[in-house]
Amino acid sequence: MPELPEVEALAAYLRERAVGHTVERLEVSSFSALKTYDPPPSAVAGLAVTGAGRHGKFLDLHLGADLHLVVHLARAGWLHYRDSFRSPAPLKPGSGPIALRVRLDDGSGFDLTEAGTQKSLAAYLVRDPAEVPGVSRLGPDALAVDRDGFAERLRSRRGQVKGVLTDQEVLAGIGNAYSDEILHAAKMSPFALTAKLTDEQITTLYEAMRQVETDAVARSVGQKAAELKGEKRAGMRVHARTGLPCPVCGDTVREVSFADKSLQYCPTCQTGGKPLADRRLSKLIR
C-alpha cells in the first residue's frame, strides 16, 4: 500500500507535471471507485489544476478554486502518468485495471489503476477534503507532530505499538511497511505495549519515525511515478525481507502472519534474540 513517502512523491510529481494545465475531462471506468456524485465528474472540465498535496495516505489534486479530487489508493492502487493517450475515445466501463482517467489540455494526464480482484481504491470529488470520511478522522501527520505530541498520541491508545502506529486516527501516514522499518530502527518489538513504554523509549521511537519517514521521502520525491515502488522496496531493511539477513546484525529476518497481512522484524535487533510466535498458532512472546 502506498504510504506517506510514496503519496508525498506522487503529489510532488503532479505538482511538477500537472499543475498549470487545464482538465479536459474526468473519465470514470469503475463506478464503484468514485464515492461521490455531487459535484458530478463533468464539473471538472475546464478547471485548472492548481495544486497537489496529501492528507496522510490520501492524495489530493486541487482543481480550480474550490474542488478537490481526493484519492485513497488502498493496497493495490497506483497512479500512472501518461504523456499522451493512445485513443481520444472515452474509457468504457470496466476498462481493465483503470478506475479513473484525468485528461489534460496538452494531451497528457494520468490513470488511477487497481490490480487484483479486491477493489478498494476510493476517489472523492469534493469541495472540501474534510468531506471525505477518512480524511476527517485523521490524526496529526506523522511528519508534522512534535515529540510531545507524538507521546500524547501514542499514549492515547492502549495496545501493541505496531497497531497503534498504523492507526490513522492516532497518526496519519504510517502503514504496515514503514511501521516495520520504524520499529526496527528503534530496536523495539512490534508487540511492545504502549502503556508500558518509558519516556526514553518514546523518544527513541519518535526519532526513528522521523528518520525513516524523512529518509524515505527524500529518496522518493523526484522519482518518476513508475519508479517509486522499486525505490520503496530497495530502501527496506526488514519489511518484505523474510528469510534474508538483517543488514544491521546479520540475523535472519522473520515474519508473523495475520489473516490478511504480515509483519517482519529482526529478533536480535528487536526482541532480545527471541522469535515471536505466529499468533495464529500460539501465544505471542513480547
Image (tube, grey):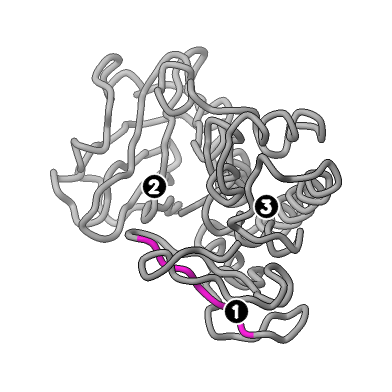
The segment highlighted magenta reads 252-258
Measure the alpha-carbon separation of dots 1 and 3. 28 Å
The secondary structure type at the circle numbered 1 is: loop
Viewer-side residue, 6 vs 266 = 266
What amino acid type should be assigned to the residue bearing mark 2? Answer: Ala
What percent of the width, then of the height, locates residue 159?
56, 42
- Kindly identify which residue carries mark 3: 221
Looking at marks 1 and 3 on the same chain, the residue that comes earlier in the sequence is marked by: 3
* Element carrying mark 3: loop
Mark 2 neighbour density, 10 Å: few (under 14) some (14–19) many (20 or more): some
**First reached walking from the N terminus: tag 2 or tag 1:** 2
Query: In the orientation shown, which residue stands out farthest toward the left?
Result: 93
Q: Which residue is mark 1?
A: 253
Q: Give the residue drawn at x 29%, y 59%.
A: 115
Report the amino acid beneath label 3: Val
Which residue lies at the image location 65% right of the left edge and 75% below the top edge?
A: 267
Residue 134: x and y in percent read 43, 28
| Residues tagged 2 and 1 counted as in contact (Cβ below 8 A) | no
- Position of 196 with respect to 126 (left or right) is right
Specify the amino acid type for callout 1: Val
Q: Earlier in the sequence, mark 3 or mark 2?
A: 2
Frontmost of labels 2 and 1 is 1
Which residue is labeled 2 in the image?
74
Q: x and y percent of residue 226 in the render?
A: 50, 62
Which residue is located at x 86 percent, y 47 percent? 200
Residue 109 falls in which quadrant of the image? top left
Whole-number angstrom distance, CA of label 2 to CA of label 1 = 26 Å
Which numbered tag is attached to residue 173?
none
Camera-side residue of 206 and 104: 206
Q: Does 49 sit above or below residue 32? A: above
Q: Residue at x 56, y 36 (%)?
A: 56
